[in-house]
Image (cartoon, helix red, strand yellow):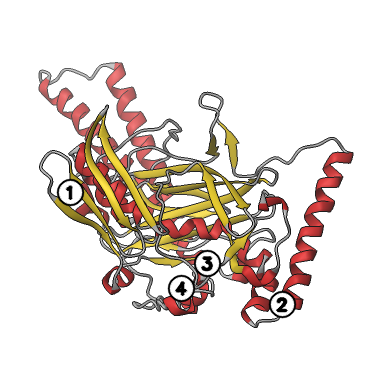
Amino acid sequence: MDLSKVTLPTFILEPRSLLEKFADYYYHCNILSRAARCDDALTRMKEVVRWYVSGFYKTPKGVKKPYNPILGEKFRCYWLNEETKSRTFYIAEQISHHPPVSAFYVTNRQDGFSISCAVLAKSKFYGNSVSAVMDGPFMGSSDSSNKISGKIKFGHETLFTLDGRWDQEVFLKDKSTGHQESLWRVDNETLSNRLKRFTVPLDCQEEFESERLWQHVGEALRSADQEKATHEKFLLEEAQRNAAKGRKLTNSVHKPALFEVDKMSGNWIYKYSDLRPWDPVNDITQYEQNFKVMTHTKHRTALVRQMSIVNVSSSEQSSRGKGRHTRQLRGRGTKVSDSSTPSHVSDTEEIDEGSSTKDDSQLQPADQRVRPSSLTEESSLNIAISRQTLQETHDRLRNLQSIVVQMAAEQQRGITLHTRDWLLLALILSLQAFLQFLFSKI
């Protein structure tokens, strides 16, 4: 029996959406940042496997199932990497209800990685047991619970084998030498190394954002009011059924807002993906605005949509943390800062595995739900960049003027400048006057 088509009782529900649960894989996305900096392909692959295993251990206490996302439901957040002063953004949307397909996009241009994924989640009931299957991500297989196994291969040759329990420790064994090392271990140090996650304040979220959409169901579950939770869940599901009936009557189909099918590969991709290598000279900071992840730059550049792998040098990494640039995210976005930690955010994060029936927003201090700043900050930044651009143009004109004067001086004394030289000088002086006018208006 396919449980995706069955309305389940609320007492087995985890009070958060599946879209948010997928984000658990990125509490240790700094491992991907390290992988992107690796020049050696094998070392890079080991780091990617380490990151993948790190996403399994964060589970609720007891047998719990997250909400089936409503069609068109969306979720967004980001994680702060203190080491590289960068942010990893996560954008998710439920793009299909039957079958249930969730799409998400993860990006950190500054550290050099991005991930696109569409997951078809299935759950089946066998009488005395339940299984969950995800078509899309890699999954190991084993006869025991919480165990994972796998291989790292080069062509048909197995280089390393992977084995262990993802909730305890996973080992990586070199096939040629027999040497075994610990790839991943769940302990107190691992919990303390989780990156801070930031979400949009609930009152700034859109109607179909996960936390706002399911807030009444979650409140009832956390207060153990199963009757109210069932009623609130029924209202959401009934509204979804009515919307489906309306589309059927009008012979229309649901069109995802953030994802589209790539004509070349047939895969779901994020509409606003930007796969350009990070330019430390031109790129200032990556930010999110109305579910669009963009980069604030000194000069406008074209987007790149094709897939690529970028290695980031250590010199570029060191230049990224210099200075502080703040970007106001207009509308209902999050505010990001180029400094290591926003001044209004606590340096500590509460991690309580015993209370894992609560959603992650309850595990973090309230001030980690970042609010937009005033327009003054954005205006100041734009003015500063405009002044810098005008100043650069002004300097180039002065250099050009010096060259023309030098060319004239090299000619014999007493010989009058050519007509084209006078025209060029007049043009340069006119442009300088225009730039002085612009400076006076800023």
Q: Is residue 173 visible?
A: yes
Label 1 Cα crowd, 10 Å radius (few <14 / some 14-19 / many 20+): few
Front in this rendered view, residue 414 or 89? 89
Task: Give the secondary structure at mark 2.
Answer: helix
Q: Is residue 242 left or right of residue 189?
A: right
Residue corresponding to mark 3: 372
The amino acid beneath tag 4 is: Gln
Say left or right for 258 vs 115. Answer: right
Looking at marks 4 and 1 on the same chain, the residue that comes earlier in the sequence is marked by 1
Q: Residue at x 47, y 76 (%)?
A: 363
Residue 210 percent location from the top left of the image: 62, 61
**Residue matched to label 4:** 368
The secondary structure type at the circle numbered 4 is: helix
Circle 1 residue: 314
For marks 4 and 2, the one nearer the N-term is 2
Give percent across and percent down for residue 307. 40, 32
The residue tagged 2 is: 226
- Kindly identify the amino acid type of the residue bearing the numbered disc 1: Ser
